[in-house]
Amino acid sequence: PNVDALKVTFSLILFTLAIVGFFVTGDDAHDGSSRQKEDQIEIFPHNIGDDEWEVISHPATLFMKKIEKRGETDENDSIYSMKMKVPMFWNPVMLSDELKETDIRSYLGNNGQRLMKPDEAASVGSFTEVEGEGLVETIFVSIASYRDFRCPLTVENLLKRAYYPGRIRVSIVDQIIQGEDDACNRPSPYDNTSSSCADNPQHAICKYAHLISYYSMDASLSVGPVFARHIGARMYRGEYFAMQTDSHMEFVDGWDVDIIQQWQSTKNEMAILSTYVSGVNNKTIDLQTGTSQTTTRPYMCDSVYEEDYDEGEMGHMRHDQQPEGEPMIKGTPMLHPFWAAGFSFARGH
């Protein structure tokens, strides 16, 4: 993967609608949230418990079964029948309109059969107490890393640059080779004399260790970023907002307040902020202060269809490195048709 340092300039973020999206006015979208705050404050942070795991087949198993039918495998390929222990998806018991117990996916739109209602949307999302500020919305941040030495620096900056770091819960899927790669849930040895939290108790990763859920897997089991991000999404536990980002990022100071304000400006409960991000250099961000130094942003328009390597007749869309320039629309997110896996921010539901 490309491990060039990247930057999230939140003042330049774009947004798109979820494919099943619908418009809800700002007042309607948040009308139920105040009623839910007291009930939802106690469940943050909710890290993965011992009883919240399940065993699944490694995704290569399905692929091997597929090509077995074509006679392209032999007995040595049986290694791909392996199982993996992963976190269960968040699935709390909810009460339906008829006051019957149901699961979260049935409650929120009957498993996609209908649009969720504003009061249903408002019932999902935890809050946490900030001293002197009251209750603030929580943010779940999912990071998938493949042998990326910048991953610990990304997690450190994510927490250190946040205005309210106590509202953030980070899930890390770390695909590494033991003995060769540094773990992403420890201070980076590149910036510290020791990667031990005992030696660096005030380091952001150590100070907020209780807000980090960490999943490590051998890099040889990696099958690309999609499956790693799938495992990361399994660690979501009802936070108000959900964010996905790459493992080689810089963050501007106060990014959490800024990005929430931008999301609120869309006045759309189903809005998703997503963009390719700018590269990091001394012209785009002050790494000492976390201040953005640029007013340009990438445009997600350089996209092509590629032939699928397995299903030759079925193409898929790929986004190249996007062109960057001064936006013509300023002061508000811009509607566009594409979504970028490297940065995505939306409501947790």
Image (cartoon, helix red, strand yellow):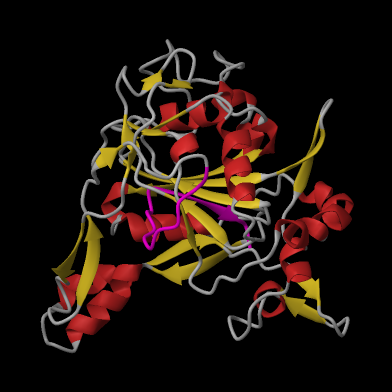
Q: Residue at x 73, y 60 (%)?
A: 29
Queried whether the magenta region covers residue 336, the answer comes back as yes
Q: Quadrant of residue 129?
A: top right
Q: Residue at x 67, y 53 (%)?
A: 49
Q: Please tell me which residue lies in front, 16 or 61.
A: 16
Please give left or right for residue 207 compared with residue 63 in the image: right
The quadrant in which the C terminus is found is bottom right
Q: Quadrant of residue 57?
A: bottom left
Q: Residue at x 39, y 30 (%)?
A: 295
Residue furthest out toward the front:
328
Residue 311 coordinates in the image, percent (x, y): 17, 79
Q: Please tell me which residue lies in front, 249 or 16.
A: 16
Queried whether the magenta region covers residue 103, the answer comes back as no
Residue 186 coordinates in the image, percent (x, y): 48, 28
Magenta stretch: helix, strand or loop mostly: loop
The residue range painted magenta reads 332-349
Q: Where 184 falls versus 323 (above or below)? A: above
Q: Please tell me which residue lies in front, 47 or 333.
A: 333
